[in-house]
C-alpha cells in the first residue's frame, strides 16, 4: 500500500510539473511582485482606478480597469517589467517567463502545393506575410470588445495544437503552431469573435482563405482555411457575424478552422480569451495560481495528426 501511494504521488507530481502554472515567486521586502508565466499565456492585473498598462515598450488603455499582459509564444525566457497607472500613480511588477515544452506534432500532407512549394509559391508566401504584418502594426484604437470574446464556430469543438512544433512530411516548420485548430464540419459558419473591422479577407498561400479582424486595443483575430469568404476589407462586423464557412484551403489535411489571435502583437492561446477572464492568472492572486488554459498544454509527447 505504501509503495502504491508513493507511486501515485510521484505520478501526480509529474502531471503537475508538466503544466505551466503562473504563480507568484518569493518576494523580497519592497521588491516588485513577480509572477511566472509560460510563452503563449496571459497575465492580468486589476484594481479600481486602473487606466493605463505598459510592457516591452508598449502602452495601452486598460480594459474595464484591468491590465492584460500577453506573453508571446516565441518569447524567450526572461524577466519582463510591467507597469500600470492606477488613480494617477504608477505601479510596477514583473513577469518571469519560463520555458514550457508544448510538444511536437507530425503532419502528413497530401500532394498539394503547400507540401512542396515552388519558388513562385514561396515568393507569394513572402508577399502574404508582408500584408499580414501590416495587420499587426496598425495603430491601436479603442477596444470594441469585452472578455470573454465570442466563439468562432458553434458548437465549439475542443481546440488543438496551440504551441506545438510541427513537422510536415518530415520537415520541421519554421515556427510552432500559433493558433488553435477546431475540427468543425465543412460548411459550418465561421463567426466574428467580437465587433471590429475586417483588415484582410483573401486567399493566402499557407493560410488558405483567411479573414483578419481588428477589434481595437491591439487585438487582432484570425480565421484560416475557409472554403469561402463572405466579408470584405474595411467592412465593420459585429460579434457573431458570419465571415465565411469552414473548409480545407491552404496548408490543410481536412476541414477545420484555425483560430488565432494577436494581442499587442503577442501570439497567445485563444483559450484564455474564450473563457471567464476571472480565471486568467493574476498578479493580485498569490493563493490560487491558475493552470494553463490550453487544452493540450499538459501533453508534451510527440503526436501524429492525420486529419
Image (tube, rainbow, N blue to C red):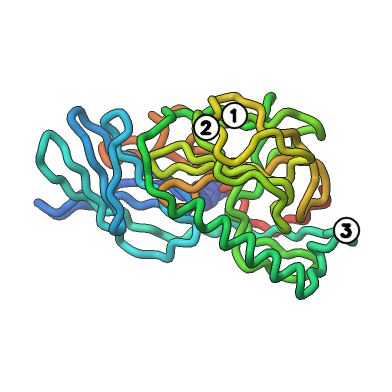
Q: Nearer the viewer, residue 232 or 164?
A: 232
Residue plotted at (52% across, 32% down): 274
Q: Quadrant of residue 205?
A: bottom right
Seen in the picture, residue 48 relative to 73 is either above or below; the reply is above
Residue plotted at (52% across, 58% down): 133
* Distance from the alpha carbon under mark 3 to that under mark 2: 32 Å
Question: Which residue in the structure is indicated by mark 1?
Answer: 151
* Distance from the alpha carbon under mark 2 to that under mark 1: 7 Å
Question: Which residue in the structure is indicated by mark 3?
Answer: 110
Residue 89 appears anywhere in the view: yes
Mark with earlier residue (3, 2): 3
Residue 117, position as x, y percentages in the image? 79, 69
Residue 247, position as x, y percentages in the image? 79, 40
How busy is the neighbourhood of tag 3: few (under 14 within 10 Å), some, or many (20 plus)? few
Mark with earlier residue (2, 1): 1
Mark with earlier residue (3, 1): 3
Q: Are marks 3 and 1 in contact (CB under 8 Å)?
A: no
Question: Which residue in the structure is indicated by mark 2?
Answer: 274
Q: Which of 165 and 245 is in front in this view?
A: 245
Q: Quadrant of residue 42?
A: top left
Amino acid at each position: 500500500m505504501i509503495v502504491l501511494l508513493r507511486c501515485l504521488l510521484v505520478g501526480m507530481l509529474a502531471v503537475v510539473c508538466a503544466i505551466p502554472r503562473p504563480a507568484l515567486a518569493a518576494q523580497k521586502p519592497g521588491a516588485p511582485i513577480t509572477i511566472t508565466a509560460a510563452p503563449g499565456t496571459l497575465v492580468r492585473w486589476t484594481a479600481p482606478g486602473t487606466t493605463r498598462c505598459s510592457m516591452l515598450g508598449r502602452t495601452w488603455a486598460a480594459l474595464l480597469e484591468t491590465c492584460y499582459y500577453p506573453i508571446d509564444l516565441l518569447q524567450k525566457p526572461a524577466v519582463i517589467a510591467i507597469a500600470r497607472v492606477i488613480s494617477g500613480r504608477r505601479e510596477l511588477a514583473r513577469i518571469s517567463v519560463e520555458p514550457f515544452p508544448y510538444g511536437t506534432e507530425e503532419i502528413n500532407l497530401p500532394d498539394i502545393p503547400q507540401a512542396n512549394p515552388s519558388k513562385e509559391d514561396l515568393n507569394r508566401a513572402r508577399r502574404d506575410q508582408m500584408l499580414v504584418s501590416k495587420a499587426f502594426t496598425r495603430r491601436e484604437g479603442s477596444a470594441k470588445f469585452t472578455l470573454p470574446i465570442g466563439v468562432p464556430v458553434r458548437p465549439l469543438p475542443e481546440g488543438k495544437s496551440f504551441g506545438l512544433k510541427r513537422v510536415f512530411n518530415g520537415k520541421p516548420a519554421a515556427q510552432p503552431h500559433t493558433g488553435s485548430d477546431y475540427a468543425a464540419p465543412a460548411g459550418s459558419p465561421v463567426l466574428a469573435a467580437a465587433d471590429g473591422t475586417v483588415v484582410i479577407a483573401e486567399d493566402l498561400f499557407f493560410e488558405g482563405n483567411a479573414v483578419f479582424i481588428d477589434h481595437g486595443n491591439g487585438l487582432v483575430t484570425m480565421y484560416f482555411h475557409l472554403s469561402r469568404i463572405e466579408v470584405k476589407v474595411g467592412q465593420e462586423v459585429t460579434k457573431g457575424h458570419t465571415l465565411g464557412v469552414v473548409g480545407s484551403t491552404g496548408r490543410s489535411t481536412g476541414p477545420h478552422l484555425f483560430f488565432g489571435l494577436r494581442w499587442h502583437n503577442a501570439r497567445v492561446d485563444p483559450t484564455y480569451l474564450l473563457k471567464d477572464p476571472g480565471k486568467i492568472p493574476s498578479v493580485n492572486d498569490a493563493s490560487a495560481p491558475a493552470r494553463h488554459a490550453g487544452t493540450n498544454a499538459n501533453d508534451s509527447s510527440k503526436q501524429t495528426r492525420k486529419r
